[in-house]
Image: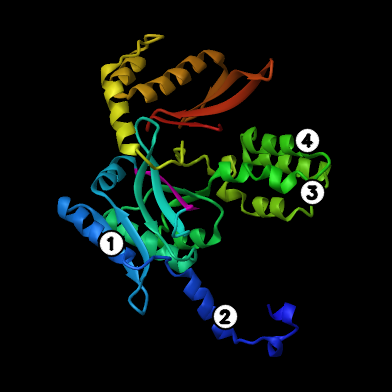
Amino acid sequence: MLVEAGGPENLTFLQKNCRNYIEKVRRMRLGAGDAYAIQKYFLKMQKDNANFFYMMDLDEEGRLHNVIWVDARSRTAFKEFGDVVTFDTTYLTNKYDMPFAAFVGVDHHGHSTLLGCGLISHEDTETFVWLFESWLACMWNCAPNAIITDQDKAMQNAIEIVFPGTRHRWCLWHIMKKLPEKLRGYSEYKHIKFALQNAVYDSLTREEFEQHWTGFIDKYNLYNNEWLLGLYNERQCWMPTFVKDTFWTEQYENALCDKVEKEKEADFRSWKSWIPCIIGYPMEKQFQEAYTTAKFKEFQQELTAKLHCEISSFRATESEIEYIVKEVVMVGETCRSVFFVVCYDDRGCDVRCNC
């Protein structure tokens, strides 16, 4: 505004007036009586179940600034499914037109399960620190092992402050869906997109990624693309080869409604249904008894995929055995052999693979 006006002397207001206006607009857009209604609802929920948790953040004038709530079921779910958490803020098209923040995990059916939510008036570091600290207190100060967010810098700062021991990564889906927006202007967009996807999804090691990335940047002269440069500089936050040493579940869906009912129905179907073993290994029978139907199906897919693998060579050292495993994979309509290095340490029953 200073630039457009040609200098501060041409403006009819001071910087302080501008900041006050921005602060007023950013306040929680609650109508008359809404804050009271929220508090009344929370008190009722807490009366019905003492494990219902909520916190309300008030500004210096006593007005509602931010709010977080976690029901008893979500607190219990965190104990089982809170190792990996997705955190997201989405602008809802409701009358408040303000960010709705959700903590989401993945349950034993592969469904997303709500682990807490809030309404916030700002999306800055200070607000996220308040939200994360409140949620952490609700969860008995047990931080998740890993957390997935979008590329928001304020979130990243707050995570470093509140969850210093938690592994943080950016959601790969959020990044890859931006390819058309960021790269469609190039005449060779389709080739660039394919080369980028190849670097992201087909690199098994960091060295392979560096080679693929440098190759397509050089081939298509993309040195001046600031978006790609930013992604490369922060590659440790999102690139699969840089984050694969940590266990990550995935967020299967964003819808937060009727989750409880869906899980109950899935539990019922899993208890009442039975999937036969397809190979008959003792390990398969063990998982048939222990897993839900959805997870046992996933296990069977992995088990049958083992048929496409064979050990091509191995060597033993004092501490472990290293296997070279060849897997036949389909690329389009053709078969291709991919080699993996698998190391087994029998002292700790530890298995590592470069995949």
Task: From the image, tell me which residue sits under label 2.
Answer: 18
Q: Residue furthest front?
A: 32
Q: Mark 1 or 2 closer to N-term?
A: 2
Label 3 – label 2 distance at C-alpha: 39 Å
Classify mark 1: helix, strand or loop: helix
- Say whether residue 89 is magenta: yes
Q: Amino acid at mark 3?
A: Leu
**Image coordinates for residue 104, horizontal then vertical, percent:** 40, 45
Residue picked out by circle 1: 37
Q: Is residue 43 above or below residue 253?
A: below
Q: How far from the left and from the top, in percent, is residue 253? A: 46, 38
Name the quarter where the C terminus is drawn: top right
Residue indicated by mark 3: 222
Q: Nearer the viewer, mark 3 or mark 2?
A: 2
Circles 3 and 1: CB distance less than 8 Å?
no
Which of the marked residues, 1 or 4, is nearer the chain's N terminus?
A: 1
**Residue 16 lies in magenta, yes or no?**
no
**Front in this rendered view, residue 316 or 312:** 312
Element under disc 4: helix
Q: Going from the N terminus, do you reach mark 3 or mark 2 first?
A: 2
Residue placed under numbered mark 4 in the picture: 191
C-alpha span from label 3 to label 1? 54 Å
Horizontal side of 209 relative to 139 (left or right) equals: right
Is 303 situated above or below 59?
above
Q: Confirm or deny contact between disc 3 and disc 2 (CB under 8 A).
A: no
Front residue of this view, candidates 56 and 150? 56
Figure quadrant of the N terminus: bottom right
- Place residue 161 in its image quadrant: bottom left
Query: Of helix, strand and loop, which one carries label 2?
Result: helix
Quick check: 338 left or right of 155?
right
Magenta part of the chain: 82-93
Residue 58 against residue 69 in the figure, above or below: below
